[in-house]
Amino acid sequence: MTTRQLYTDIRNHRMISGKFGAIKFGMWGIEFSDRHSFATLTDTPRNTHVTNNIWQLEQGRWHSSLRTAQTAPTTISASAQFTALDHAPLQDAVLRMVFDKHAISHGKIAGKTYRHRDRDIYRLHPIYQAREVRLIGTDGCEIIITLDTYDGAGRFKPYLYLRDRGDHWIVHARLLPTNPVDHVWLRWANRFFTLSAPDRLSRALWDMPGGKKMLWRLRERMGRHCPEIQAVPLNRLSPGDTLWLGVTCRFR
């Protein structure tokens, strides 16, 4: 039997690239956002800038930290912290892991199996429904991602999701606002502009029977063929409040 080895290129606690058998992965990082800004280490930030891990978003300042390490021959651990420096709202906080699709046969989450169809669906589940995400290689190897530690500061709850986009499988460990939410942002977005419903209308639609179930992150749940219409809740944190996520990725 051939023994597969795990190779990683980790710089300044960031996963740049890695390989396990034929499976390639990277870049990994963090993301978080308020209503107007998007902070990210792996994509293009919007309406924000960062200095010494302090991010200035439109609605407040945040300090972030990311720690990634290969802790055993076939294990990677990653953790992230997001600390509010102002009274500021947030829609999510994310630890993001990306895997090349080509040597992966299928993915599993919440007891269901998915093939990569580039549908860009966020298969999002609270942690009590999905304790792990599994990616199965075409050669039979397996990657198991678990969300082991988290702290939502009493305002956010943990989720995992599995997403098939482009040439990649994307796995997020994610903190999302818990009820009662402070603000509901109902938006329609496209590549040219974003339109927002008035706050009172957004809240009224959210609070009506079935409103939350229908509108909550609708585009994410339905995939790329759904119009970019969805309701996004935000919760406000106080200075010093900290969100925390810690994941373990095991290769076997």
Image (cartoon, helix red, strand yellow):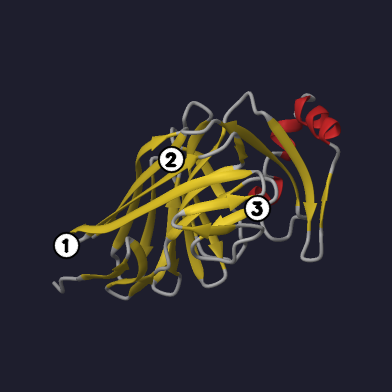
Q: On screen, 209 above or below 160?
A: above
Name the residue tied to disc 1.
73
Give the CA distance from mark 2 to mark 1. 26 Å
The structure residue drawn at horizontal position 61% and vertical position 33%, both measured from the top left corner, is 235
Q: Position of residue 67 (x, y in %)?
A: 33, 54
In percent of width and height, residue 148 lies at: 33, 40
> Which residue type carries mark 2?
Ala
Q: Is residue 248 left or right of residue 224?
A: left
Numbered circle sitting on residue 130: 2
First-in-chain label (3 vs 1): 3
* Nearer-the-camera pick, 146 or 105: 146
Question: Which quadrant, please, contains the N terminus?
Answer: bottom left
- Dot 3 alpha-carbon crowd within 10 angstroms: few under 14, some 14 to 19, many 20 or more: some
Instruction: Say left or right for 231 vs 32.
Output: right
Q: Marks 3 and 1, how far apart in space?
A: 38 Å
Question: What amino acid type is highlighted by mark number 1?
Answer: Pro
- Between marks 2 and 3 in the image, the one whose residue lies nearer the viewer: 3
The quarter holding residue 8 reads bottom left
Check the picture and name the quadrant holding the C terminus: bottom left
Q: Which residue lies under the disc numbered 3?
A: 37
Secondary structure under tag 3 reads loop
Local SS, label 1: loop
